[in-house]
Amino acid sequence: MICFTLDILSPCLINVKTGATAETEVITLKNKSVLSGYNKKTGWYINWANFDRDTLIKAIVLKGSSVIQGLIAMKADPVAKAVHILWACASPNNNVWKYGKKEYSGVGGHLFAIAGKYSVSLGYDGFVFGEAMDSEIMNYYIREFGAEPFPFGYPSHPYRIIVPEASMKMIMEEYTYEEIE
């Protein structure tokens, strides 16, 4: 489920109050006990520890920090030759839609760049698809990034979209981050 629109395309996160930029790192999360702290009770929509071992979960943090600013869960789909974004959301402190506040801008763009880079690493040329939370978010990606409805997959979903390779390439080129395994 894609729970955000891209507020800004910027190589770093930007502190909303000060305008200061913050370099980022991307961390792969595998430990179920760590992931169990990111759940509905703590404002993360779902229990992130419930994903299976085949799901790749990555977190974006400020460089030198362990405070997660956003999470993305992805799975390779060899039939579609694409990466399926299962869930992607900003942290509660960056979630205007649900909590009415945002500490940093640029989280959503980083998460899309992570998915695009993973797609490229699998030989899928940045091909990425996922389900928008609602029609408003789906229409935003259609309007702003040329996304298209993507009716494939099971179960079907009314807001499933695919983001074209050219749009993903533009997003990936904008974002810089250090990857930590």
Image (cartoon, rainbow, N blue to C red):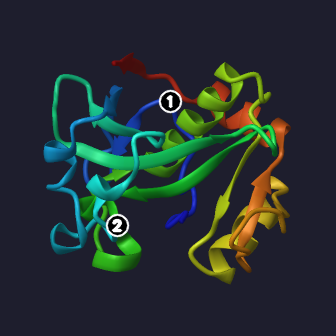
Where disc 1 sits, the SS reads loop
Asked if 98 appears above or below 170 in the picture, the reply is: below
Q: Position of residue 174 (x, y in %)?
A: 61, 30
Which one is closest to the eye, mark 2 or mark 1?
A: 2
**Secondary structure found at label 2:** loop
Identify the image quadrant of the C terminus.
top left
Horizontal and vertical percent position of residue 79: 81, 43
Q: Position of residue 10 (x, y in %)?
A: 52, 37
Residue 11 is labelled as 1
Identity of the residue drawn at 48% across and 58% down:
87
In depth, the one of 98 and 33 nearer the eye is: 33
Q: Residues within 10 Å of mark 1 (few under 14, many from 20)?
A: many
Q: Is residue 155 left or right of residue 149?
A: left
Alpha carbon separation for disc pair 2 and 1: 20 Å
Q: Look at 53% across and 34% down and name the residue there.
A: 114
Write down the residue under mark 2: 95
Examine the image and state in which quarter residue 56 appears: top left
Along the line of sight, the residue nearer the viewer: 33 or 126: 33
Q: Residue at x 40, y 48 (%)?
A: 52
Q: Residue at x 42, y 32 (%)?
A: 12
